[in-house]
Amino acid sequence: MWTDIPNLRHLRAFAAAVEHGGATRAAERIHLSQPAVTQALAKLEARLGAKLFVFGADGMRPTEIGTLFHDRVARAFALIEAGAREALGADARRPGDGVARFARLLTVAQLRALAAMQFNRNFSLAARELKLSQPSIHRAARDLERIMGATLFIAARQGVELTPAASIFARHAALAHAELKQGFAEVAERLDADPGEIVVGSMPFARTKLLPDALNALARERPRARARVIAAPYDGLLGRLRYGVIDFLVGALRDPAPIDDIVQEPLFDDPLSVVARRGHPLTLRTSATRADLLAYPWVAPAEETPARAVFDRLFPPEDVARMPGGLFETSSLVLLRGLLAGSDRLGLLSARQAQVEIDQGLLALAPFQISFGTRRIGLTTRRGWRPTPTQALLMELLRRSRESEAAEDAIGKTNGRRRPSTSPPARRRS
C-alpha cells in the first residue's frame, strides 16, 4: 500500500493550485517556491498523462480532468486530517501546532511504513514486504510518531503493537489511499486508457449466479474491465471494506448493520429452503412437518450468518440435541453439497443458490416451507464512498438482478417449475 502513490508534496501543490487559483498563490499557501510548485504540477501531469490546468486571460484554471482528479485528492487529504484529528484526540502527548502542520509534514514513506506495520506488527517483516532496510522502516515510523506527537507503536511479546491512535489513523490513511487510487483510475478511464480494477467482496449466495451474471455483463459492456473477487467470511470482508481494500460487498445483508460507517442497499429478498440429496425420503413426499425434519441429521449454516439465525429459530437447542447424529456446520456450498450427497442429512439453503445442483439432479427441495426463512440480499458500501464509472456500472448491473429474478420467476411459474418469491423488499421502519 502507498507504493503506487506519488509524492504527497506534489498532490498538495496540485490541490493548492486548484483551490487558490494558480502556482504563485499555491506556493505561498504551502510554503514552497513557485518553481517547486510548477515542477510538482508538471510531474503529476506526466504521471497522469493528462493536462490538469489551462491558461487563459483569467489566469490558471483546472481542466475537466483536473477538476475530477482534485475531488479525489481533496477527499484523500480530508480523510488524513480527520484521522489525525481523531487519533490525536485518542492519544496525544504533544499537540504541536495542530493537524495542518502534521498534514504538511506527512510523507508517503511514513504512510507506507504505517500500513506495513499494521499488517506485519514487526519492523523486520515490514521491511521485507516493502523491500527496504529495517532501519529505514523504523526511522519512517518514528518520524511519523514525532510529527503527530503521539505514541503509535509499542513493544509487545511477539513484536510491535499499534496503539489505539495508530489504529485510528491507519484506517483513515488506508481510505485516503483508496481515494487516490480511485482518482488515478477515473483519470485513466476518462482518457480511455484503463478502466481500473474493481475489488468485490462476495458472500456465498452471490458466487453461484448473481455475481457471475453481472461480471459477464460488465465484460460485454467494458471488455477491458478487470475485477478481483474476494471470498471470505463476512467479518473478514467487512474489515477489508472499511479499510478500502474492497470496493463493495455483495450478498446477505445484516440486520441491524454491524457498524454505522457502512451503508446497506437491499436488492431482493431470498427465501431459504430445506435441501437434501436427490432421492432423499423427504423429497419423495408431498409434504413434510417440522417433526419430520427432526428425524434426520443436519448440516447447519455457519455461526453469525443470517441463515444460521433462521436455523436457530427453526430449531431451538433442545431440538438440536434430539437430532440423530452430530451437527455439522459450514458456510461452504461445495462442502454442503458433498455432505448431503453422501448421506440423508438435511441442509438450509436458498433455492437460487442451489439451482445449479438442483438442475443437475444432485440436490432437491424438501416439501417444507419456512415462513420466516427469508434473507435480504444486497450491496454493502462504505458511507460516503463514491464509485468510479466502471464500479458504478457493475453495481447497476447487480441492481438489475431485481428485474431479471422477477422475469425468471414468471417463466418458472409458466413452466410449472417451483421458484422462490423475489418480490422487492418492503421498506423497513427506522
Image (tube, rainbow, N blue to C red):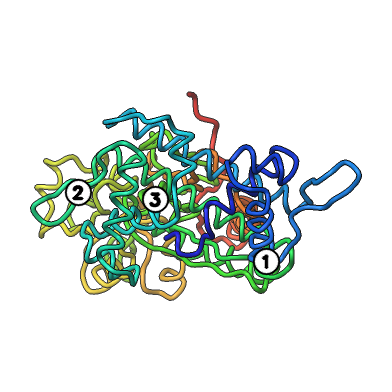
3 and 2 marks in contact (CB < 8 Å): no
Nearer to us in this view, 184 or 250? 184
What whole-number distance in Å separates the C-alpha atoms at marks 3 and 2?
Answer: 43 Å
What whole-number distance in Å separates the C-alpha atoms at marks 2 and 1?
Answer: 39 Å
State the image coordinates of residue 321 (x, y, percent, origin top left): 9, 47
Question: At numbered mark 3, what does the secondary structure look like: helix, strand or loop?
Answer: strand
The answer to whether 94 is drawn above or below residue 208 in the figure is: above
Q: Which mark is residue 272?
A: 3
Q: For the residues carrying marks 3 and 1, which lies nearer the camera in this image?
A: 1
What whole-number distance in Å separates the C-alpha atoms at marks 3 and 1?
Answer: 54 Å
Mark 2 lies on residue: 161
Quadrant that contains the N terminus? bottom left
State the image coordinates of residue 153 (x, y, percent, origin top left): 23, 47
State the image coordinates of residue 135 (x, y, percent, origin top left): 25, 63
Nearer to us in this view, 279 or 318? 318
Whether residue 232 is visible to the viewer of this picture, yes or no, is: yes
Q: Residue furthest top?
A: 430
Question: At numbered mark 1, what does the secondary structure look like: helix, strand or loop?
Answer: helix
Mark 1 lies on residue: 46
Q: Residue at x 44, y 33 (%)?
A: 99
Q: Which mark is residue 301?
A: none
Task: For label 1, count other residues whose C-alpha is less than 10 Å away and answer few (under 14), some (14-19) or many (20+).
Answer: few
